[in-house]
Image (tube, rainbow, N blue to C red):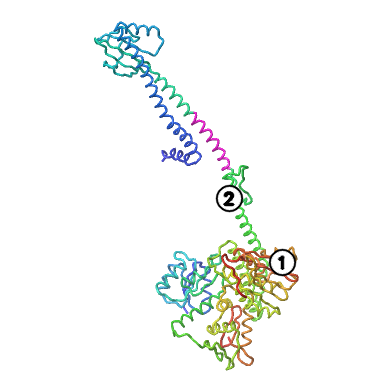
Amino acid sequence: MKILLVEDDPQQAAYIRKGIQEAGHVVDVAADGRDGLFLATTESYDVLVLDRMLPRVDGLTVLRTLRASNVATPVVILSALGEVDDRVAGLRAGGDDYLVKPFSLIELVARLEALARRGVAASGDAAPRTRLAVADLEMDLLRRSVARAGRKLDLKPKEFQLLEFLLRHSDQVVTRAMLLEAVWNYHFDPQTNVIDVHISNLRAKIDLPGLPPLIHTVRGAGYRLSADVA
Amino acid sequence: MSRDAPQRGLRAWFASPFHRFAVALPAAIALIVGALFYPLFLEAEGNIRDEVRAAITLEITGLDEHFHERGLKGLREVLQRRIDDAADRDAVYLLTDRDGRASVGNLSEWPAGVPVSDEAWFSIREPDGSTLEGQVFVLFGGDRLLVGRHSPLESFQRHMSMRLWGSAVLIIVVAAAIGWFFMQHLHRRLETLAREAARIQEGHLAQRLSLSARDDELDALARRFNRAFDEIERLVDASRHVSSAIAHDMRRPLISLRRAIDEAREAAVADAVLGERLEGLGAQTDALLRTFAALLSLARIEAGALGPKWQAVDLAALAADAIELYEPLAAAEGRELVGSLAPATVRGDPDLLFQVLQNLIENALKHGAGRMELSVAVQAESVVACMRDHGPGAPEAALPKLFERFFRLDESRSAPDGAGVGLALVKGIVEAHGGRVVARDAQPGLAVDVVLPLPRGGGGAGLG
């Protein structure tokens, strides 16, 4: 995966670059909005990471210019705490995700990977998926039913949404904040293990005794739904 | 360049509104007085001229009668008598033959500049500066008669202009003096205010602008500024408090983090142990970051930097979401979380209001005990959300302090993640929404009320 990072603070940029490289991706760094715009339009990237406050051309202007010139590459906007945290303005300008500093690298990488895959899915088949499956776990989105190894499972609505999100991001790390945003539509970092309890309730229904577990806890990061134990 | 200097000095002098006022006021008064009195002066001048001519005409009429009755001889006698009587010092007579040789008169010769033509009026200036007005008659036989008067016009003019200039000078002097006195007074007050403001600038934030006993416009302005300074002092105090509280509160976790790092570095530990230790370090760091983040967003909310994201929000729906989110966690800890929710619409930021409810629940989970009840109801003019638990509660004196940053009922207890900021954040967000928070003893347990105003123009209550 090839990622463009537009960040003017060299220390931050080096830190983020290192984090993304360690996750196995290629990173280009631009130090201001003009260079970022130039690279984003001339090279091909899977995801852009764009700081809101940039010298010369600010982040939202870069984003608007890209979208106006039909560059559809997914964009994660970074905003520093203390600036007016206007998620709506960022998303309206064409952003796909929005992270407020300080964030953890795991959180950023998880979101980048989720976005990159969405980009691929969108450019591939356009038909909406009606069935999701990992190993012997199947979800029918039309009937809103879930089955494990052929056995129908009885899930609460929120548990269904949680599982749907995990299935759509199978084999990826999904953070607690991502789950809170996707399922509850509130934007903040959950301070306690409030999400964990929901996951463990879901896990109790999915990972039935005698079957290989599918929901894995990734320490210090979040969860991953996968057939492989890693 | 050097030639500009005095001009700049003068310009600078005139730049002061006081100086401009001190010059403009007397000038304006002098101008008004001049404009009022100059026409009066002209009118008086005309009246005097008319009067002099009337007196001359009267005199001529008398002389004419004598001339008709007794001829030139009679005229001479009358003239001589009048001159000898000297009853009228201003009167001037001169009778000459056709060649201008004087026969009778108090003038030695025909004055220069007086035309020799019948019934001609003249007005000449005499060598001593006074004015002579009169009329000339050419009699039968060519004799000439001049009847005139020394006009008081000149002395009137002299007197009047002296008085006018005198009063102008007086007006200017008096107005300048009053202006100067007044300006000095204003100047002194402004200088006092400037001095006091400079002290504030130097960092004496408790300094205030002094007020006079008069309660005038300057006092109103000073009071305005004082209110602004009160607010600044409050904000600065608050941020000082926050920074010292952060410094104080971050010390302990940072020190223990430092110690844990040293321990983790120690040689010869198994990989698994090292991993566990690093995990712990990560968790501690995350907790610190969260506390920081909470403090920063609290500061932002208190600074009034709320985004324009307000909308109509059903607090009951938010509460239902919050209960649904926390219910499993409460159950896992053996607690019960129940709601009693009536639809209640408020205006605000849904993310922030959700954080209010979330913090209330977390506070009750961490610090309370027993059953937790979250209720939302419309009461009179407001929407009240109440979080109540059945734990030991808090002593009466500590209730208002619960909303202070880093306040802990038990000082010896160390801070869990984000501790001490939750209820302060609740208070900050609620106050930013125009509401208030109250903590009270629910006997048993602690109840925290969040009171938000009903949006204007419609109640939020519907059918439950």
Instruction: Report whether A28 appears left or right of B299.
Output: left
Mark 1 or 2, nearer chain start: 2
Q: Amino acid at mark 1?
A: Arg
A127 in relation to B245, above or below = below
Q: Which mark is residue A4?
A: none
Marks 1 and 2 in Cβ contact (< 8 Å)? no
Quadrant containing the C terminus of chain B in the rendered view? bottom right
Disc 2 on helix, strand or loop?
A: helix
| Residue A162 % position (x, y) | 57, 82
- Asked if both marks, 1 and 2, belong to the same chain, the answer given is yes
Residue depth check, mark 1 versus mark 2: number of the one nearer the observer: 1
Residue found at the far front of this picture: B69
Task: Pick whichever, B451 or A74, lies toward us.
Answer: B451
What's the chain of the residue with tag 1? Answer: B
Other residues around mark 1 within 10 Å, as few (<14) / some (14–19) / many (≥20): some
Disc 1 on helix, strand or loop?
A: strand
Q: Which mark is residue B440?
A: 1
Numbered range of the magenta stretch: B170-191
| Residue B48 % position (x, y) | 39, 21
Q: Is residue B185 magenta?
A: yes
| Residue B28 % position (x, y) | 46, 35
Identify the image quadrant of residue A222: bottom right
B432 in relation to B15, above or below = below
Residue position marked by numbered label 2 in the rendering? B225
Q: Amino acid at mark 2?
A: Phe
Residue at 63% across, 83% down: A200
